[in-house]
Each structure stands twice: as structure tokens, then as C-alpha cells.
Image: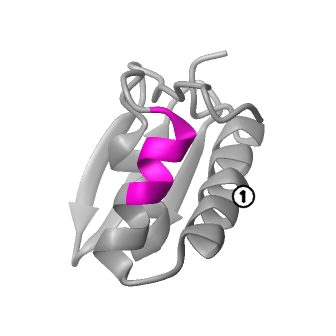
């Protein structure tokens, strides 16, 4: 994925935080997804206004990891969110 890609959450999914974990209800796909802390942080930043690079930079700061690890994690999680059809095409 290109670093200047602006991932955006689908507006028709329901999101709740349950006991500190983000739960995404996809009625269209009839699925429930539970996101860990890292994935939740990335999900929150998929607002259509932040690039992958910006999301990775904020992740690196928030989780005290190096920028390469953060970039790799963001690309992986965003790819998974895409494959689950939780992001806008």
C-alpha cells in the first residue's frame, strides 16, 4: 500500500469498546471483530484524513516502538481490515 493512502473506516459498521477492547459489528457481513490494543489504535486513526505514514508515526510514539516496526504493523493491520471489508474501498 502506498504511504500516501488515506484509509477510512466504513461508516455503516457499529463500534463499541468492551472492557478496553474495540469490538466492530459488521451487519453487512454478519460478523463481529474484536481488535487488540494495537489494532484498535490503528482503527481509530483510519479516519480518511491520516496517511499510513502518519498513523505509523503516531503508533510509534504511543507504543514506544521504532518507526519500521510501526510502519510494518500499520500496513499489516490496514491490509487485514481491508480484507475484512471494514474500510471504504
Residue that label 1 marks: 76
The span shown in magenta is: 51-57
Q: In front: 42, or 10?
A: 42
27 is higher (above) or lower (below) than 21: above
Query: Does residue 12 appear in this view?
Result: yes
Left or right: where 83 falls relative to 75: right
**If the image is split into quadrants, where does the C terminus sit?**
top right
Q: Quadrant location of residue 84?
A: top right
Query: Does residue 41 appear in this view?
Result: no
Question: What crowding class fits label 1: few (fewer than 14 Cα within 10 Å), some (14-19), or many (20 or more)?
Answer: some
19 is higher (above) or lower (below) than 31: below
Picture coordinates of residue 21, whole percent (x, y): 32, 71
Picture coordinates of residue 10, whole percent (x, y): 47, 23
Q: State the residue at coordinates (63%, 74%).
A: 69
Picture coordinates of residue 15, whole percent (x, y): 31, 44
Task: Tell me the element at label 1.
Answer: helix
Q: State the residue at coordinates (42%, 22%).
A: 48
**If the image is split into quadrants, where does the N terminus sit?**
top right
Picture coordinates of residue 25, whole percent (x, y): 44, 43
* Main SS class of the magenta portion in the image: helix
Left or right: where 85 falls relative to 18: right
Q: State the residue at coordinates (42%, 70%).
A: 60
Left or right: where 36 falls relative to 16: right
Amino acid at each position: 500500500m502506498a504511504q500516501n493512502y488515506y484509509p477510512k473506516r466504513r461508516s455503516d459498521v457499529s463500534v463499541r469498546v468492551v472492557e478496553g477492547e474495540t469490538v466492530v459489528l459488521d451487519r453487512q457481513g454478519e460478523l463481529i471483530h474484536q481488535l487488540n490494543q494495537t489494532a484498535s489504535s490503528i482503527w481509530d486513526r483510519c479516519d480518511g484524513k491520516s496517511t499510513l505514514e502518519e498513523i505509523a508515526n503516531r503508533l510509534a510514539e504511543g507504543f514506544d516502538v521504532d518507526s519500521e516496526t510501526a510502519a510494518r504493523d500499520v500496513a499489516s493491520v490496514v491490509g487485514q481490515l481491508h480484507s475484512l471489508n471494514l474500510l471504504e474501498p
